[in-house]
Image: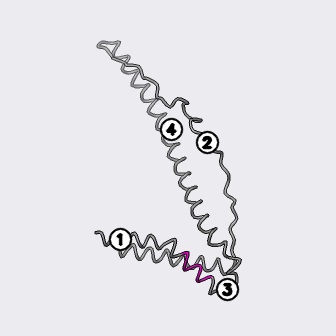
Amino acid sequence: MTSNLYLSLGIIASALFIFMTYGLYNGIGLIDNFPKFRNFKRGEIFMQSGAFPDLPNTNVGDGIGGLILSIFLWIVMTIIFIVLLIILEAVFWFSLFILLAMLYWVFFRALKLVFKRSKDTKGSVGISIVYSISYTALYIGWIFGIVYLSEIIR
């Protein structure tokens, strides 16, 4: 398994190295055009108190009244369950969007730090390679270290 991880990380590191070397050699710059989002405040969307309301206790009796009340409660609970599933789906998609936005921000910031040097390295292969090797070692090297330590500990 670790040899597979080393191979995969080697391919990723090689691709990252080539990409950064090419970008630094050609003087590529990044433009921050990510949309700005409204800052949400705590308690703005949900209840202000943060407490869940008390639900009534429903003891269903025997007979026809209990049967009708059970069917009614079954329909109400089905509707509540469907609404909760819709809310869960919305939360899932919102969480996925936030995760993708965070990954975009991390990768954008990381590459912005690299391509900030493109003014100095434009047209110079040697300096571009030196910067690319150092940033590749920083961005991928710690993952190699984790894989190596997991192999030693095992």
- Mark 3 vs mark 2, CA separation in Å: 46 Å
Which of the two discs, 1 and 4, sits closer to the camera?
A: 1
Which residue: 39% across, 25% down?
Answer: 74
Which residue is disc 3 drawn over? Answer: 124
Q: Earlier in the sequence, mark 3 or mark 2?
A: 2
- Mark 2 vs mark 1, CA separation in Å: 40 Å
Residue 132 drawn at (x, y percent): 58, 79
Which residue is disc 2 drawn over? Answer: 40
- Mark 1 vs mark 4, CA separation in Å: 42 Å
Which residue: 33% across, 12% down?
Answer: 64
* Three-letter amino acid code at the position of disc 1: Leu
In this rendering, the answer to whether 54 lies above or below 148 is above
- Mark 4 vs mark 3, CA separation in Å: 54 Å
Given contact means CB atoms under 8 Å apart, are the residues at marks 4 and 3 in contact?
no
Residue 119 placement, left or right of 144: right
| Color theme of the render | one colour
Foreground of the two, 33 or 137:
137
Highlighted magenta segment, given as a residue range: 128-135
In this rendering, the answer to whether 79 lies above or below 26 is above
Mark count: 4
Quadrant location of the C terminus in the rendered image? bottom left
CA neighbours of label 4 inside 10 A, class few (<14), some (14 to 19), many (20+): few
Judged from the image, the secondary structure of the residue bearing numbered disc 4 is: helix
Which of the two discs, 4 and 2, sits closer to the camera?
A: 2
Q: Earlier in the sequence, mark 1 or mark 4?
A: 4
Whether residue 28 appears in magenta in the rendering, the answer is no
Which of the two discs, 1 and 3, sits closer to the camera?
A: 1
Q: Earlier in the sequence, mark 4 or mark 2?
A: 2
* Three-letter amino acid code at the position of disc 2: Phe
Majority secondary structure in the magenta region: helix
Residue 110 drawn at (x, y percent): 59, 67
Which of the two discs, 4 and 3, sits closer to the camera?
A: 3
